[in-house]
């Protein structure tokens, strides 16, 4: 069913990619978390993540969590500006691979949701139902579901857009919100309303659908790891975690600083399951009507932002990859002794800001009354990649002092080199963020070949790579057994490598059967 | 209460701005609609607008209207690409005047909507109520309203963001959808789901709030007229059309080709009405707590797109202002005799596309098998501003043939001048669209000083400028009387001019009172 897939996100995948028991050489070193620190020295990002994370969101004015409807959050300007950049980059990648943007209704009549039985069963418990307009109660049949995802909405419309091979492939995405009544919520990670992109593609053959799933994974790798610096493990999900109504699901897991896995985009091969229910047919090259083959792909920009904050922040606060940063440069004017010099400095700051914005570099001036040191700390906490300090001497000399969020010291640059110096600094910052994130991620894999070995490592924070019987339904009991003893969930088999346990190796789930697969398991969100 | 306001959108406002009976010299000439034609020669845009408009939306693949939930529409890629450009331009204008983007929840607990009584009464009949999650019916008090507008949502959150003068002014906008259960719907004009921007500002003084309403009008004029080429009349709305919960409402009306007014953005001075209900207070310069002053402003990008389509299209199809066009240039390769030449042409087309996109000019290549003439007609219908025809001779010579959507003939340009020539062509196109739209709009004003004069002109398609008693509640009966005899609605008094009827002139509404105001009335959407 699946082609060989070739992606593991982090540059050096550590033990995870090497079969066999030597994996535990690379066991995560407890008591030596990576050199991440606390927000305002209050919390340790790794060891106290559940306190650190909300404090970071609040300190940096990213999210307001006090809204009086459970599971709903307000995204403040700094978060929205970041999310906008992330959307721009993701949409460009989608359009670069032939996707077109569209916008579909946010609601669906209940009949649509009911068309695909597994899909309905999977989503129904979380669906918000509109049953009343003003004081009029809607008759059954006219009730509307707020979309938890848009398959049934879009495919109802697709039906009329497709009749022959000339209409295929159809590749459409929409950037939108969806609503699911989650019981637990955590800002930017799990909530009742989240912002995502959903791409829904239609093909004439199963082979193209399979290739699209691979292309979706390649896009996740390119954008989320390549541009946002967030490493991921790409897995084929077990049957019990397959998207409701799909043939199979591939998904990307990253690891938050507390060592728990967080699902980032998933991509689903729907085969003909939906096309048969929604009557999406085309006339094939032999002149016969055939049901189309479909895929869908759903990167949640909202959640990727959560992962971005968690992954890159250090003890001084947020850090953003250069292209994603809500503001890329902050100019801090340094007060001069003579008022005339202050005027000159202010003018120079405005000039530089205009010049940098002309060059497409997002720039702010902090002209508030605060002391420079306070401003430096503040904008470091906010994650602005580059700082320009502008005093009377700099304003007069044509030299500019740059400071990077990830490099020690200050770098004097002649004005004529400004844009280049800033962009270079941005690229070095990107490389630093990515290298640190990859190291943390790669160090988080442990291989355990027996249940005893797992027990010796029961406090491991990260991925367990373990021999397992099956990720089809018959592996469910072993999944439950690991879940109950270790609180870990089997996330699936690694895509791109056909990892087999050695002959005679038993499943760690306790079924007594021979292990057929190496799977990855972790505590999860 | 109101300062003198200075805006009338169209460059030469025609008779509308000149008080007195000479206005009817400029009466609209029936039987001579402006030189707009039919989509594919099927319908006349002005005289058969109700057939023309849906045909245009369908022919250009802008909107799919067949969704099985009443009043909900699908925006197809060509519409979404256009709307994205409109959002970018509008958001840049808002950020240029100190607004920051945020995103607030799409739902509110019913208690929030109930806080401001007039507001609740105004919106409640149109509210979609979520009363059930999965199969669980929500207890009263936990039901959620899908936002019909976001005052109550945002102000609940604002409360915690404001404590002193340092937090003011607060200027926030969100780009989002809202949902209102309208009875009638027309794609991009009125529907149950629409895309807009809502800006909600908070000030320390009433004066600043009044000035913000003027600034909002100035922004509407700058963006919608200046950049989108859509003329508008800015009016102070009568009391009965004031936003529920506002002190007063200013709004912009454009005119669709059928002569009916369509409301574009409105801006509301909320005074302290909401701040008192939502407890938005600040400590003023005397150390005392004071309720803040608020405004809100709501340009519906979705509806402005509808107005854009209707205003600028001609007998060959859509026309877009250059900055708004979903694609700005289409390159059409012309088939050569020798296959080697075709290869050269294809390469040249790719080269030009890359070059233009580097320069920020949105460009597509139409490499389909259709005949060039077919392609020319198609992309003219789709409204692409500039066409490049690329044959073997052009590819070899370094010359390029340009054609404009609004100019006759073709213009040869040397490649070295390409970007400049395209941008210049774009600016000429903008000027043409705006001039034609302004002329249609300005010619649509008629002044009638008596009811008899109105009866003589009862088939007028456009704005009546008429003497009227009052736009406070005591004018309501006269409003109803005009509504029932002429099917026109009094839209308000013109902002920026204190238009007074001559002494002794009577209200045309039949109350027998002296007219105090000149008001504008029209059939409306
Ligand atoms: Zn097992
Ligand atoms: Zn009257």
Image: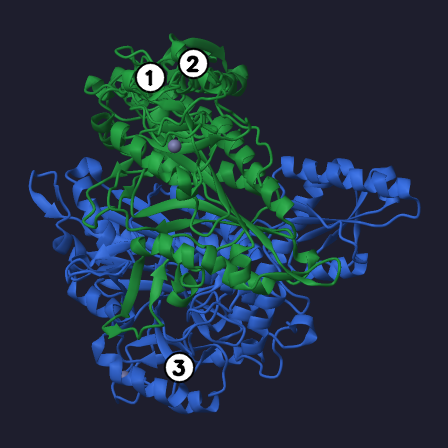
Chain colours: A blue, B green
| Frontmost residue, B380 versus A413 | B380
Q: Secondary structure at mark 1?
A: helix
Residue A506 against residue A501 in the figure, above or below? below
Residue under label 3: A488
Residue A482 against residue A135 in the figure, above or below? below
- Mark 2 and mark 1 in contact? Answer it, CB < 8 Å: yes
Instruction: Name which quarter of the figure residue B301 lies in.
Output: top left
Q: Earlier in the sequence, mark 2 or mark 1?
A: 2
Instruction: Name which quarter of the figure residue B52 lies in.
Output: top left
| Image side of residue B154 versus residue A133, left or right | right
Which quadrant of the picture is home to ligand 2? top left
Classify mark 2: residues with Cα within 10 Å, few (<14), some (14-19) or many (20+). Answer: some
Classify mark 3: residues with Cα within 10 Å, few (<14), some (14-19) or many (20+). Answer: many
The nearer-to-camera label among 2 and 3 is 2
The nearer-to-camera label among 1 and 3 is 1
Residue under label 2: B21
Q: Position of residue A182 (x, y in %)?
A: 36, 71
Q: Are both tags, 2 and 3, on one chain?
A: no
Q: Secondary structure at mark 3?
A: loop
Q: Are both tags, 2 and 1, on one chain?
A: yes
Disc 1 to disc 3, how far (Cα)?
A: 82 Å
Q: Quadrant of the N terminus of chain B?
A: top right
Q: Which mark is residue B453?
A: 1
Q: Residue at x 32, y 88 (%)?
A: A481
Callout 3: residue from which chain?
A
Residue A168 against residue A261 in the figure, above or below? above
- Asked whether the viewer can see residue B355, the reply is no
């Amino acid at each position: 069913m699946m082609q060989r897939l070739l992606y593991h996100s982090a540059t050096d995948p550590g033990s995870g990619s090497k079969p066999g028991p030597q994996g535990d050489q690379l066991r995560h070193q407890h008591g030596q978390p990576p050199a991440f620190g606390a927000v305002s020295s209050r919390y340790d990002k790794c060891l106290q993540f559940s306190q650190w994370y909300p404090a970071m969101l609040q300190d940096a004015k990213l999210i307001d969590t006090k809204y009086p409807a459970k599971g709903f959050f307000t995204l403040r300007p700094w978060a929205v500006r970041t999310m906008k950049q992330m959307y721009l980059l993701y949409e460009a990648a989608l359009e670069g691979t032939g996707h077109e943007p569209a916008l579909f209704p946010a609601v669906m009549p209940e009949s649509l949701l009911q068309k695909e039985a597994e899909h309905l069963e999977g989503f129904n418990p979380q669906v918000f139902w509109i049953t009343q307009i003003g004081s009029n109660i809607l008759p059954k049949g006219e009730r509307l579901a707020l979309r938890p995802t848009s398959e049934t909405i879009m495919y109802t419309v697709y039906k009329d857009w497709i009749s022959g091979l000339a209409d295929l492939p159809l590749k459409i995405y929409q950037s939108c919100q969806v609503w699911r009544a989650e019981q637990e919520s955590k800002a930017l990670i799990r909530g009742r309303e989240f912002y995502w992109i959903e791409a829904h593609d239609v093909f004439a053959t199963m082979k193209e659908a399979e290739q699209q799933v691979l292309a979706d994974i390649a896009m996740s790798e390119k954008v989320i790891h390549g541009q946002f610096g967030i490493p991921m493990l790409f897995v084929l999900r077990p049957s019990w975690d397959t998207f409701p109504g799909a043939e199979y699901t591939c998904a990307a897991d990253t690891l938050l600083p507390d060592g728990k896995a967080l699902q980032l985009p998933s991509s689903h091969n729907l085969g003909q399951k939906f096309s048969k229910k929604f009557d999406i047919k085309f006339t094939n090259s032999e002149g016969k009507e055939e049901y189309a083959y479909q895929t869908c792909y759903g990167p949640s920009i909202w959640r990727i932002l959560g992962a971005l904050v968690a992954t890159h922040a250090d003890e001084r606060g947020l850090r953003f990859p250069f292209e994603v940063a809500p503001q890329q440069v902050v100019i801090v004017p340094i007060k001069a002794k003579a008022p005339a010099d202050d005027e000159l400095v202010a003018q120079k700051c405005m000039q530089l800001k205009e010049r940098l914005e002309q060059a497409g570099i997002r720039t702010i001036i902090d002209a508030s009354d605060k002391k420079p040191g306070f401003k430096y700390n503040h904008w470091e906490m906010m994650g602005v990649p580059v700082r320009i300090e502008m005093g009377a001497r700099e304003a007069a000399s044509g030299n500019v002092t740059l400071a990077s969020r990830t490099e020690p010291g200050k770098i004097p640059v002649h004005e004529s080199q400004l844009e280049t110096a800033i962009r270079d600094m941005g690229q070095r910052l990107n490389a630093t963020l990515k290298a640190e994130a990859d190291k943390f991620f790669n160090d988080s894999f442990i291989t355990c070949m027996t249940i005893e070995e797992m027990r010796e490592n029961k406090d491991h924070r990260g991925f367990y790579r373990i021999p397992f019987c099956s990720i089809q339904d018959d592996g469910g009991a072993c999944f439950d057994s690991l879940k109950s003893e270790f609180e870990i969930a089997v996330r699936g088999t690694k895509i791109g490598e056909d990892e087999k346990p050695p002959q005679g190796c038993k499943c760690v789930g306790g079924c007594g059967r021979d292990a057929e697969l190496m799977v990855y398991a972790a505590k999860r969100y």
